[in-house]
Image (spheres, rainbow, N blue to C red):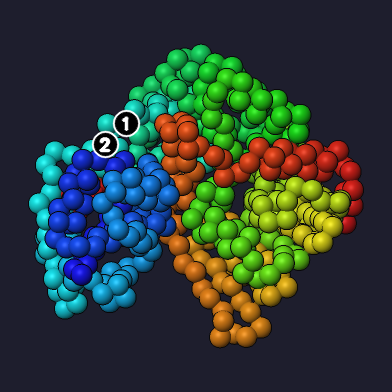
């Protein structure tokens, strides 16, 4: 039996893909199709795929041409697959001519004619573009704009800041066409907004945006009251709009995979999660201004809360906070959560520095994520028997905001596949914890 293998991303499956598979199949008796994983595509710099790996596999399967589908996860896998499956012919489109000649040592290499006039890139470009308006033009918005530029199907069309001069300067710097003089002007120019204004203004802006029918991506911390979070989520649902909190860690490739691995039991039962996020900040910074909802908890707590709630759930027995205060804000807080079968803790600080790593301990081993764990591209799973230790590396490009932007845009464009990487329940729980802290409940001043 003559075995043929071919590989591809097969995003937005099109006629060119079909023709290629058909031609490859005709070369032999058994066709193996390798479909790239989302992570492998990210590593190769292909971060704009619209369909996830399951959807892409389904599309290949539905042609009925593949006798076997394998997933391609890493560079160098082709040689191993060819040997493992006893492949006779490696086939690929003619756009790759010459590139895979190194495989000739292992099997025949055939470059098949490519179908003219169609490609996934072209189809992605033909999809509608989400026009985005920005509310707030501070430092995070300045990092956001270049990140949005590398994401397909989104264009920043306008920005708003009550300080018109500042807004003009921002738009000029980033080549944004419209400086909005009012929220109404901003909303009339866009279909979605990114709220990057001071924390205490989030609730008001998000609500106005939703009421105006705009999809919303809101910076962290989302809001400080559970009732406000609940109200905004209900409003988004009612209006059929996407509302996402821009908690960047949740959208990064490494974090997502770490959570799935731990949930699948690689370190046994999880008994403790500890994470710390500290960023020494100038005392005069707005981040330490009590009138502006500054402080370490408000600024940073959402980051360590993410792994705690993801891994141990939102139903803890109690939480205690130990805070060091200065000028009416916490410059450092340690929080300790008691769960029925586990414990969790975190440290956040703007005026105190700690090691910023994360350790998740289990009955069979532990996960170690080095500082700064919240924007990591690497972690380790460690065991008593050090021979079993494993290191995992992932892409983390630029400022790491592109992953959340991509998800937000996909959420708007392909609603049927949309699911938020931070659930409503988790967001509500974060707001509830912030609220409890602000009420002073179980807060011990040190
Ligand atoms: N292919 C083809 N004809 C096309 C497009 C793709 O024969 N018009 C082939 C490629 O040469 C490759 C396979 O289909 O062998 C899978 O390619 P893939 O990279 O997934 O598709 P593209 O449409 O080329 O995707 P992109 O635009 O993202 O590069």
Where residue 403 sits in the image (x, y, percent)? 46, 47
Q: Residues within 10 Å of mark 1 (few under 14, many from 20)?
A: few
Tell me if 176 is positioned left or right of 204 in this view.
left
CA–CA distance between discs 1 and 2? 7 Å
Residue at 81%, 51% in the rendered image: 316
Reading the image, the residue beneath label 2 is 123
Where residue 124 sits in the image (x, y, percent)? 30, 37
**164 above or below 329?**
above
The one nearer the camera, 275 or 338, is 338
Quadrant assignment for the N terminus: bottom left
The one nearer the camera, 140 or 422, is 422
- Visible in this render: residue 94? no
Where residue 224 sits in the image (x, y, percent)? 73, 35
**Number of marks present in the image shown:** 2
- Mark 1 lies on a secondary structure that is loop
Residue at 19%, 44% in the rendered image: 16
Reading the image, the residue beneath label 1 is 127
Q: Are marks 1 and 2 in contact (CB under 8 Å)?
A: yes
Residue at 39%, 57% in the rendered image: 37
- Visible in this render: residue 140? yes
**401 above or below 335?**
above
Determine the image quadrant of residue 260: bottom right
Determine the image quadrant of residue 351: bottom right
Disc 2, ligand 1: is the CB inside 8 Å? yes
């Amino acid at each position: 039996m003559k075995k043929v293998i071919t590989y591809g991303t097969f995003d937005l499956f099109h006629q060119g893909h079909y023709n290629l598979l058909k031609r490859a199949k005709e070369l032999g008796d058994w066709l193996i199709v390798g479909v790239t994983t989302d992570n492998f595509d990210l590593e190769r710099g292909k971060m704009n795929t619209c369909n996830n790996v399951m959807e892409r596999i389904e599309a290949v399967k539905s042609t009925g041409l593949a006798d076997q589908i394998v997933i391609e996860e890493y560079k160098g896998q082709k040689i191993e697959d060819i040997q493992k499956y006893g492949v006779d012919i490696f086939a690929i489109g003619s756009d790759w001519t010459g590139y895979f000649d190194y495989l000739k040592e292992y099997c025949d290499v055939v470059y098949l004619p490519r179908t003219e006039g169609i490609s996934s890139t072209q189809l992605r470009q033909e999809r509608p573009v989400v026009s985005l308006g920005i509310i707030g033009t501070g430092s995070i918005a300045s990092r956001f704009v270049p990140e949005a530029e590398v994401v397909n199907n989104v264009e920043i069309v306008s920005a708003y800041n009550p300080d018109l001069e500042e807004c003009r300067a921002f738009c000029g710097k980033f080549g944004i066409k419209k400086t909005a003089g009012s929220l109404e002007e901003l909303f009339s120019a866009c279909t979605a907004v990114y709220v990057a204004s001071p924390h205490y203004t989030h609730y008001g802006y998000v609500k106005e945006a939703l009421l105006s029918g705009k999809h919303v991506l809101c910076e962290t911390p989302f809001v400080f009251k559970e009732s406000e979070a609940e109200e905004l989520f209900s409003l988004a649902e009612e209006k059929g709009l996407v509302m996402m909190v821009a908690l960047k860690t949740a959208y990064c490739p490494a974090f997502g995979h770490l959570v799935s691995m731990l949930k699948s039991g690689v370190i046994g039962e999880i008994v403790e999660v500890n994470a710390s996020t500290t960023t020494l900040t100038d005392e005069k910074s707005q981040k330490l201004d009590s009138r502006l909802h500054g402080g370490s908890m408000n600024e940073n707590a959402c980051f360590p809360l993410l792994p705690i709630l993801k891994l141990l759930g939102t139903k803890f027995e109690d939480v205690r906070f130990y805070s060091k205060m200065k000028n009416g804000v916490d410059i450092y807080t340690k929080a300790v959560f008691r769960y029925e079968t586990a414990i969790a803790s975190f440290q956040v600080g703007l005026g105190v520095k700690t090691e910023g790593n994360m350790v998740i301990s289990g009955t069979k081993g532990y996960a170690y994520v080095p500082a700064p764990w919240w924007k990591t591209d690497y972690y380790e799973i460690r065991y008593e028997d050090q021979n079993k230790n494993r290191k995992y590396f992932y892409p983390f490009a630029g400022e790491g905001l592109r992953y959340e932007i991509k998800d937000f845009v996909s959420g708007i464009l392909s609603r049927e596949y949309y699911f938020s990487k931070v659930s409503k329940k988790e967001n509500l729980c974060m707001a509830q914890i912030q609220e409890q802290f602000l009420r002073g409940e179980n807060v011990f001043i040190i």
